[in-house]
Image (spheres, rainbow, N blue to C red):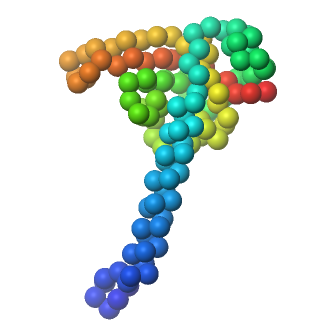
Amino acid sequence: MSLFGEKSKEQKQVEAEQKQKQLELEEQIVNALKEIYVFPGTKSEFEDFIGYQTVWVDLGKRNLGILYNDSRDNPFSGYDFDFQKKIVDSGVVALVNANFNHSNSSFDSYARTHYYGMPVKRK
C-alpha cells in the first residue's frame, strides 16, 4: 500500500487474478455438480443402470441425504460453496433413492422442484 492507503497497481492486479481464479473454480464446481445423476431407484438399481458398483458417501452432515434443485443454474445452490466443493471432491456421482418434492409457495417467484437423495460415489 502507498503512504495514503491506496493499493498499488501490482496489488490490484494480484487481487484481480485471485478473484478470476476463484470465479473459474466456482464455475468448475458448478459444472461438475450438474453432472450428478438424480436416480429414483435404489443403490443396486443405479449400479445396474450405470454398470459399476458404488459406495455411500458421508458428507459429514447430520442428515445423510442432500437436496438437488433442478430449477436453477446450480443444482446445489442451497448449500454454501465449501459444501458444494466437498460434494465434488468426495466424488459423488449420484443421488439415489431420490424423492421428488414440488414446491410452489407464495414466497417463491417460481415453482421449484427438489429431490432429496442419498449420495453415492464410484467404488
Q: Is residue 56 left or right of residue 18?
A: right
Q: Is residue 123 left or right of residue 84?
A: right
Residue 101: x and y in percent read 42, 11
- Residue 108 position (above or below residue 73): above
Residue 76: x and y in percent read 47, 31
The answer to whether residue 64 shows anywhere in this view is no
Query: Which residue is at 66% across, 9% downward?
Result: 42
- Residue 24 position (above or below residue 15): above
Query: Which residue is at 47% across, 67% downward?
Result: 17
Residue 68: x and y in percent read 48, 24
If the image is split into quadrants, where does the N terminus sit? bottom left
Residue 100: x and y in percent read 46, 10
Count of numbered circles in the view: 0
Name the quadrant containing residue 77: top left
Query: Which residue is at 49% across, 46% downward?
Result: 27
Residue nearest the viewer, comparing 80 with 25: 25
Q: Is residue 23 left or right of residue 37?
A: left
Name the quadrant containing residue 56: top right
Query: Which residue is at 50% across, 59% downward?
Result: 21
- Residue 32 position (above or below residue 64): below
Residue farthest bottom in this picture: 3
If the image is split into quadrants, where does the C terminus sit? top right
The answer to whether residue 85 shows anywhere in this view is yes
